[in-house]
Amino acid sequence: MDSIHIVGGKRLEGAIPISGAKNAALTLLPCALLTDEKLTLTNLPRLADVDSFGHLLNMLGVSTKVEGVKKGEFGRRMTLQADDLHSTVAPYDMVRRMRASILVLGPMLARAGESTVSLPGGCAIGDRPIDLHLRALEAMGAEIELAAGYVKASAPNGGRISGGDFSFPVVSVGATENALMAAVLATGRTQLFNAAREPEIVDLCNLLVAMGAQIQGIGSSHLIIDGVEKLHGCTYAVMPDRIEAGSYACAAGITGGSIDLVGARPEDMLATTNALAQCGLIVEFHDNGIKVSADGKLRPLALSTAPFPGFATDMQAQFMAMLCMADGESFLEETIFENRYMHVPELRRMGANIDVRGRSAIVHGVNGLTGASVMATDLRASMSLILAGLAAEGETEVLRVYHLDRGYERLEEKLSAVGATIERRSAG
């Protein structure tokens, strides 16, 4: 099994190109199910999750053709075409690998009139629930059946689902995405209230419009979708990854360095850049991205995660690692997901001083961190350990790096280019 080895203590300086967004890519890929014409996605990141989603689409009858990239370049070009769906069943063996697989539910229902998808991870509805996905589809006339660990959605009498109104009781990114993809081919008008406003939702809407969908209110919490008979193919570029950009910004902060995030879009990550500035970093917006530079000792922060435009839950772990080196006590509150502090014990192994109380954490700044062998528990936790390793004295070994490969394209190459001593090693 691979591991990442880092010799810390190096000041990072230079430019890092920001890849296409993982969270956007996994939302745009299932749009291929909505048309029998070719859909070409560019700036597609080379990630394990993207490959897994491609395999799932292949099983459903979508052909995929990937064009390679030249050495030193990032982002791939993939052409997808679903002439005819071979299956409308997404099996457990595929869905268990990533929860984003649930996003085939809405488009398959809209295109084929039925869709059967394993419950993500085989979990119960109440655990990281998908009930809002199902309730939104029911508002469009879908009939929902749960049996043997699968959810089956079908249009009445084998026809098409119809437009309907649904108000999300809480903001849900995934449920908004599924509802959008179902509504674009429904008969009549659908209105979604309290819809998620994340940049990835805007990216999805923009792709659907490019395919011929009729959507009003893009970027707001009130989306109005008038269903159309048919969507067509198009070519579309995946948005830059705001979480990757924020992660590398934290690398500049924790190492006292300066990194130019080439291609990052300031409007997508204002909560992150505001927090970076409050922490004492210099944040400069320019025509081709964002430059983040350290300016003395890091200042402590009080942060609470929230749906967009609030501070992203996917940035919490990286900021926690950086704040371990701040001058004072920082307070973090995780309001989106439970059990999102699993990286804390591993950071403590490196000398961090962190108290966790339920969904809150107090980070007591320390003078320095020490390299150690640590175990990654999830994608963003993995990055927090990489960041800690970059600042730590001595060598850090990060195990279970398959988590990193789900969300960070060629991480070692990008960090090495700005001065990090980092390498991947394979066991045996």
Image: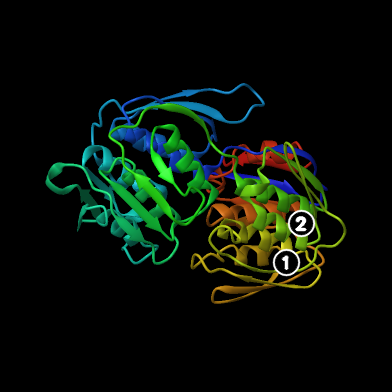
Residue 167 horizontal side relative to residue 16, left or right? left
Does 401 appear above or below 304?
above
Question: At 62% across and 73% down in the image, what residue appears?
Answer: 361
**Residue 84: which quarter of the image?**
top left
* Residue located beneath label 2 in the image: 392
x, y percent for residue 378: 53, 55
Q: Earlier in the sequence, mark 1 or mark 2?
A: 1
x, y percent for residue 229: 27, 34
Q: Secondary structure at mark 1?
A: loop
Does 260 appear above or below 217?
above
Q: Give amino acid for label 1.
A: Gly
Residue 203 horizontal side relative to residue 260, left or right? left
Question: At 55% across and 57% down in the image, what residue appears?
Answer: 308
**Is residue 51 in sight in this rendering?**
no
Q: Are marks 1 and 2 in contact (CB under 8 Å)?
A: yes
Q: Secondary structure at mark 2?
A: loop
